[in-house]
Structure formats: C-alpha cells, structure tokens
Image (spheres, rainbow, N blue to C red):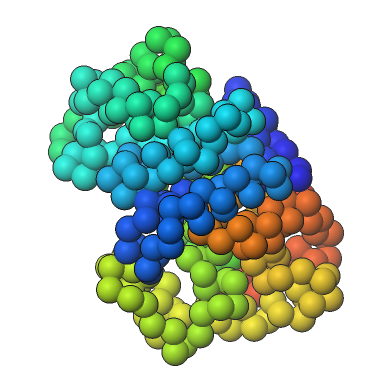
Amino acid sequence: MLTRRLGSQGPEISVIGFGAWEAGLGPEWGEAPPTEQVVAAMRQAIDEGIDWIDTAEVYGDGRSEEVVAEAVRGRRDEVLIATMLAPAPEGTGFRPDEVARGCRRSLERLETDRIDLYQLPWPDDTGVPIEETWGAMAALVDEGLVRYIGVSNFDRALIERCEAIRHVDSAQQQFSMVTLEEAELIAWCGEVGTGVVTYGPLAFGLLTGAITMETTFSDGDHRGEDETWDALFVPEQRARALTVVDAMRPIAERLGVSLAQLALAWNVYQPGVTAAIAGSRDATHVTSNAAAGALELDAQTLAELNALLPLGPVTEHAGG
C-alpha cells in the first residue's frame, strides 16, 4: 500500500482510506447488513494496510462512530480516525461552544482520547462566521483533543479565511473520473500544503461497472434522491458516465485489474490528491479496493484514461 503525507504538516496515511458513511447503517446505501458484517469489513481494511477511517457525527446519527469504535477496539494505535462536526440543524453546530461539545460527544462514541483529523463537512449557512468556528477547531488542537483539522466542500476563499487563523491540514472534496468540478481547487490545495482526501472516487458505484441504465435504488438510498441523483444518476448523466466505464474496460482488462481499482488508482494519481476514500460493507470489496493502493499507472495509461474524461483531460501527474 502506497502512503503519502497529508499536506505539508499532516501524518503519513495510506492512499486508500475507509469511508464509514455506509457504516451508519441507515437507508442511504440500501438495506443495512448486520453490524458484525460492517465491523468485519473495517477490520479487513486494517489488515489490508488501510490505516485511516473517515466517519462523521451525522452518519446514522452517531451510529457510524460507534461502529468504528467497535471495529478498532484493541487496534486503535494502528488506525487514524477522521470524523466530522456538522453545522446545525443537521449536526451539533458551528458556534465555538458547539464545536467543543460536538468534539467531546464524538470522542465518547469513538471511545478514544483523541481525534486524529477533525473536519467541517460543509459551510455553515446559519450565520456563524467561519473565523469563530475555525478558531474553536484550532483550540481543540491546542487542548490535545484533536491532532489535525480540515474542511470539506469548502471553496478556495473559505479555505484561505481558515488558513489565516491556523493551517488547514486537509480538504475533503468530491472527485472522480466523472465528477471533475473540483480538479482546479484540489491542485491548488496541493500547491499550498493542504492535503486532499477525495470522496465519491467511484461515483457512488457508477465506476465499478455494477450499475446499469436499468439499476434502481431503494427508498432512502441517497443515489436515488436529490443532489446525487441530479448530478450522476438522471438518465443523461448516467449514460455519459457509463460511456466512460465502457471505455475503461479494455484498459482494466489489459492491466488485469477491476474497474473500481482502475478508477481509484487514477484518482490518487491526480494533482493535489493525497488519498481517496472508499467505503464498503463487504470485506471482499474492501480487499479489492485496498489493492488499488499498490497499483502503478504509467504515463501512457494515464493519458489513455484522461482522454476518456467527460469534461476533457486533466493535467497528467504521477503523484499527489
């Protein structure tokens, strides 16, 4: 498993991380499996060299954090835990006292004495100035409750406002071969020393080859609702993405890898990307995802893949 440093000041992490959104055991990913199956998948990830898990207080209303705690029990020193504090009303809130309270609640659910990476998942729209929130996040580092702090779904202007107070160790942005809108921001983060961990690198299943034009989603599955559906799964967008998938098949076959492995490897080879988050409730899928962290892509293969991108090629790059 390849590892990279998270930004200019962060820890060394595996280029594939485990995403625990699905471990919230809610309906967002279809029918939930037994908790023990999800715990087994997380433990398999650790066995495969994935050394960080990403969760959030809002995943299953805290249930995901509790499942993470169960999975890493007895192995805490082998794993970095990243979690998120959400703004109100979905989460605890972004006011300084709420930041401190949310952190302590997550620590309790995670059964740990520190959060390795504490993140803000999206900008607050209730009027709390980001400077107040980020100052409270920095205070958690000074207090020793948190090691590193980051943001997610922030634009450059917001990141720069945070940076003026304390270094932004990481940015978590949606990015895949069919969702390229954040490519410029991600590359800039790499230039200024902010690590980037990408979410949705498999386009929520589209880039695995398991989804067709006929695939439907159960009630509550986020892929069949709201923004995710509009961005990726409406017929026009889905057809466009599946055209990319079909063109990837001969390349994957030539390399002897799965479509998912190829898509993940492409992701971590892009400018500014430190690592990609891949979640699963199935230990077999976890093993396959982890293998992508050791896959090397030469310049010719990257050029072939970049030529398939629906929004045009991105700059070729052999590291994050």
Is residue 189 among the parts visible in the rendering? Answer: no
State whether residue 267 is above or below residue 235. Answer: above
Taking the image as shown, residue 44 lies to the left or right of residue 173, namely right
Left or right of 45, for residue 280: left
Task: Depth check: give the residue in front, 258 or 42.
Answer: 42
Q: Residue 291: x percent and y percent?
A: 74, 56
Q: Residue furthest top?
A: 143
Q: In which image quadrant can residue 66 be found?
A: top left
Q: Depth check: 206 or 189 in front?
A: 206
Q: Residue at x 32, y 35 (%)?
A: 85
Image coordinates of residue 160 in percent, x first then y, are 42, 30
Given residues 269 and 148, the one toward you in this image is: 148
Left/right placement of residue 260 relative to residue 26 reads: right
Quadrant where the C terminus sits is: top right
- Residue sitting at 69 percent across and 61 percent down? 288
Q: Is residue 314 above or below residue 311?
A: above
Q: Where is residue 42? Give x, y as percent.
A: 56, 47
Q: Is residue 220 above or below residue 162?
A: below
Residue 165 % position (x, y): 39, 18
Judge whether residue 300 can be spotted in this image.
yes
